Each structure stands twice: as C-alpha cells, then as structure tokens.
Amino acid sequence: MAYRNKTYICFDGDSDMAHYRLMTAWSENNKIDFDFYNAHDLNTARDSSQEESIKRQLRERFANSKLLVVLIGEKTKYLTKFVKWEMEVALKLDLPIVGVNLNKARAQDDLCPPAIKNQLAIYVPFGISIVKYAMDNWPASHARHRAANETGPYRYSQAVYDQLGL
C-alpha cells in the first residue's frame, strides 16, 4: 500500500485554475506557512484524450492521498465527468473532505456539488489561514465524527476565525 501523505485537490480546470495555482504558489513560497504534498505532482495523464487513461492516473494519485480539497466555484456543481467522479472516489476511500468556497462563504451553500452535499465534510472560504487550518485539523475531526457515525456538512465556529485573525 502507498504511503498516504498527499493532498488531492479537485477543481474546475476551466474556471478555477487560478485558485489552484495560487494554492500551489502559497506552498512554494518560503515566506508563507502553507505546505502540502500535492497529489497532482505524482503523474500526468499520458494519453489525455482517453477517459480511462486519465482515471487510471487519477486513481494512482488517490492511492497516495490522505485528504481531498474541493475548490468550489460557480460551475463546480455542474461538472459530472471528472470532478464528480473524483469526489465519489474520495468518498469511497473515506478521505476527509475540505470544501473551499471560492465565493468566501464560511459554510456549505447552494454552490456545493451534489456528490458531497450530504456527506461528512468541512466548508471554509478560500484564504491561506483558514484553508491551512482545515487541512491541518479536519482529518482528525473527520475521524472522530466518522467513529460517532456522524455525517453532514460542518463549519468552523466564529472562535476559530477569531483565533486566526479573520
């Protein structure tokens, strides 16, 4: 079995690439305390014209992932080919899910993709401090909620945002 230390980021590649690139830039900047091992660095689909070839490469990334971050933009909930499939795979693998609202909402809202709407996940706005906090803390919380058979959307309290200066 692969060592699961990667973060898998799921997003609308047509509309939300800039947010994904910004997250990778945060991670690469030594002056910013935001580090993660990106599952997308593992491989690239060699034959990007074939759906099964792409999914095979994505499965390899999932095999090394400990967390799914979903960048939720205006069109994410309408994507059914790969983005929905990625969320469904993460659910089957019981990966903790962090929904990152690009519209800055602090909780699940009407842009949430149906695949994760009623699932155990935490929702945060897009921003360095709160995304880092969720990536660092949600996996342990997810495990506790899962052990108690809890489900549904979660959000952080105002106290967490205050602690982070947000």
Image (cartoon, helix red, strand yellow):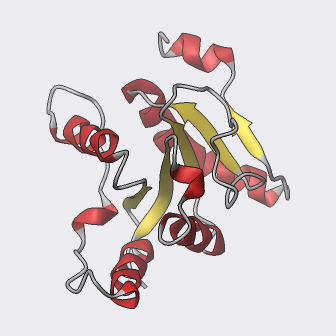
Q: Residue at x 74, y 56 (%)?
A: 119
Above or below 107: residue 12? below
Q: Which residue is drawn at 85% across and 59% down?
A: 149
Judged left or right of residue 52, residue 83 is: right
Q: Residue at x 81, y 53 (%)?
A: 151
Viewer-proximal residue, 124 or 144?
A: 124
Q: How many marks?
A: 0
Judged left or right of residue 12, residue 116 is: right
Which x, y percent locates residue 101? 53, 35
Viewer-proximal residue, 122 or 1?
A: 122
Above or below 69: residue 65? below
Viewer-proximal residue, 99 or 133?
A: 99
Above or below 132: residue 8? below
Judged left or right of residue 161, residue 132 is: left
Residue at the right extreme of this rendering: 149
Quadrant of the snapshot with the N terminus: bottom left
Which x, y percent locates residue 67? 49, 57
Q: Which residue is drawn at 30% across and 35% down?
A: 34
Which x, y percent locates residue 110? 70, 38
Which x, y percent locates residue 165? 47, 10
